[in-house]
Image: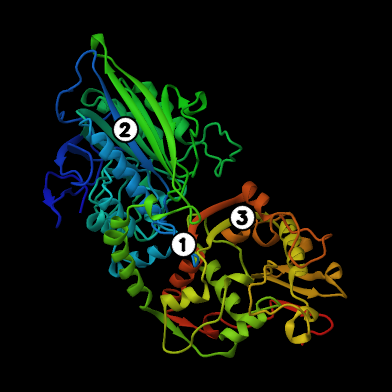
Amino acid sequence: MGAIMLRKILLTSALGCALFLPSIGSAETLAIRPATPNPLGALEKLYVLNGNATADEALSLDAAPSETSLKRGETKKVRILHINDIHNRLVEFHRKGDTHRMAQIAKIVNDARAEAAATGEKVLFLSIGDEHIGTAWDELMGASADEFQMSAPYHALSKAGLDMAAVGNHELDKGSAVLARMIEQDADFPVLTANLSGSKFNMPWAPAAIGVVNGVRIGFIGLTSVIDTYLETEADPNLKGYNPAEVAGRLAAAMNDHVDMILIASHVGYNGKLGDGQIAKYDLEMGDVQIAEAVAKVAKKPALLLGGHTHTVLNKNGFSDDTIISGVPVAQAGEYGRYVGDTTVALTLKEGGKIEAAYETKLIATKGRKDETEADYDVAYQKNVLDPIKAVLDKRLEAPIGKVIPSKALEQAEVVEKRYIGETAIANFMNDAIVERSKNWTTGKVDFAAFNATGMGGVDMEGDLTYAEWYNVMPYADEILVYELTGADLKEIIEDNARRVLRPEELKKNGGPLDPSKFISRGFQHYSAGVRYEIELGSNALETKAVNITLNGEPVETVLDRKYKVVFNSYVSNGREGYDGGAIKGLPPEIKGYNMEAKRKEVAKNTYLLYRGQIIDFIQNEAKGIVGEKTGAKYDQRVVVRGPGVN
């Protein structure tokens, strides 16, 4: 349905969009082929570049789409609205009311285009990657190409008039075959990546494109992170990533004589100076700074870099010296659709044929749940585009993912009674599943996993286990973060966790104030099987201790300097439930919680995978559809609580 590419065979998709299949292998000359722009977008003409842009040789293009329409002394403006890293936040569902992020973005785009139309101009709309992975909408993609139903974000963006997108690293989380289906079926726009090549699936993406808007020829180059991307997998062993700066430089040089400006859509990450107290999420040796520098060395036409991947909020007060790299302005619009970047380039053709550019940028903030009204979003778009997809999602959630072997240990009453006071079978299953699934992640297999008690419930054992029922077990969209911790770090975290356990005298059934069936924000966590320890309650929380701690069978005292990869969820990682180094609800003020938030900024990487989504994948794959003792849903005494009043 939309995009792209090569071999000199032009196909037409069901919606009439030009689709070229890519050739495999290196080539010095990239073919230019006309394609059909998104009919709801702004491009007047579209040409797709076909071929392998990762070859070491200098690249050239086999034809120019047209001569420039710029006249000497004339200034033409190109306004670009851009988003990045929306991670499927099309709607943020909340029990107190939804936030219509995508419908807000659609309104911003529609309003800007209506305003521009009054002067005969058009406004581009671009996404810089990572449209997928992060919410329940992911379930529509399925676990494989055979189970694929649709790409909700590509479909929604197509209907919002998107003109172009870059491939983000998370577009490949479900595999190359699924991404190919997503582009073919749901993208009415070109999807670009120039530095990924070699897939056996004849990916319907392109390295670059040339589009004409307001009479201005723009060369678009798509780039993808090679660090956090599923490359050279068992399913697609020859899909490789190449140096994005080198590839961008070669493409920019090849485009010079065919465009009026160059736009790099970089899902590689911003690694320049940060203002506004922001802290870099990644320490990138290769990022937008190096890409901008490489393009600046060869570009004879004005260049602009629009970025993503690092979720960075740039240019709240317009471009600064820090965000103009070697003369190339760099912009990025945060994450999750909370901002829309609004960047304008004014191009003037000077004597001698040189084109000069002036750049302006700002951020348009969307509104959150408490502030949003119907006036802030496109109600018709929500009703006609997103609500029907939600209906498909609801149907998907009723589909079975497996069966539960009946067990008292998994029942709701048992889980809610045990989750705050010690071991639970469902938490054992969940955390062990995460460790097993991690062998598929770009971070590599982890050693241990943890999950907080407030984020889980019991399992409905009547009939098939459906997606919706598992969402009741895990109602929150917690993301997976991988920490690199020492044994000493883990010892401190486990000791902190022991103090958070509910004591027998606190329980309502014993005359205390706390009902375990309710949300108790104490932050007690459960661990995977490699972490084993005992909790000695003592006479009060100040005396509570974690003892006999072992990590993969070794006493923690013997591995204090050893490093481990450990999963924590985004809720705890963001400092909730006393994990910000401050007070812990219900405990004496002398007890301060472990600062997971600070540690996250030092040593954690967000996978943007959903904890519950990975467990669903485990149930469907490794567990072969079974949740029960044989697949890890059982007690094994990985934590034992001792003290007065303990049964």
* Observer-nearest of 457 and 206: 457
**Does label 2 or label 3 sit earlier along the sequence?**
2
* Label 1 packing within 10 angstroms: few (<14), some (14-19), many (20+): few
Q: x%, y% of residue 263? A: 33, 32
**Does label 1 or label 3 sit earlier along the sequence?**
1
- Kind of residue at badge 1: Asn
Task: Estimate the spatial distance between the alpha carbons at disc 1 and disc 3, rounded to whole Å.
Answer: 25 Å
Residue drawn at x 26%, y 59% is: 181
Q: Could you say which quadrant of the image residue 485 lies in?
A: bottom right
- Kind of residue at badge 3: Asn
Q: Which mark is residue 603?
A: none
- Kind of residue at badge 2: Arg
Q: Nearer the viewer, mark 1 or mark 2?
A: 2
* Observer-nearest of 470 and 562: 470
Task: Estimate the spatial distance between the alpha carbons at disc 2 and disc 3, rounded to whole Å.
Answer: 36 Å
Quick check: can you spot residue 264?
A: yes
* Label 3 packing within 10 angstroms: few (<14), some (14-19), many (20+): some
Is 462 above or below relative to 533? below
Residue position for label 3? 574
Residue position for label 1? 440
Left-right relation of 589 to 518: right
Residue drawn at x 42%, y 79% is: 624
Residue position for label 2? 79
Task: Estimate the spatial distance between the alpha carbons at disc 1 and disc 2, rounded to whole Å.
Answer: 41 Å
Left-right relation of 408 to 68: right
Is 496 above or below relative to 34? below
Q: Secondary structure at mark 3?
A: loop
Q: Could you say which quadrant of the image residue 90 lies in?
A: bottom left
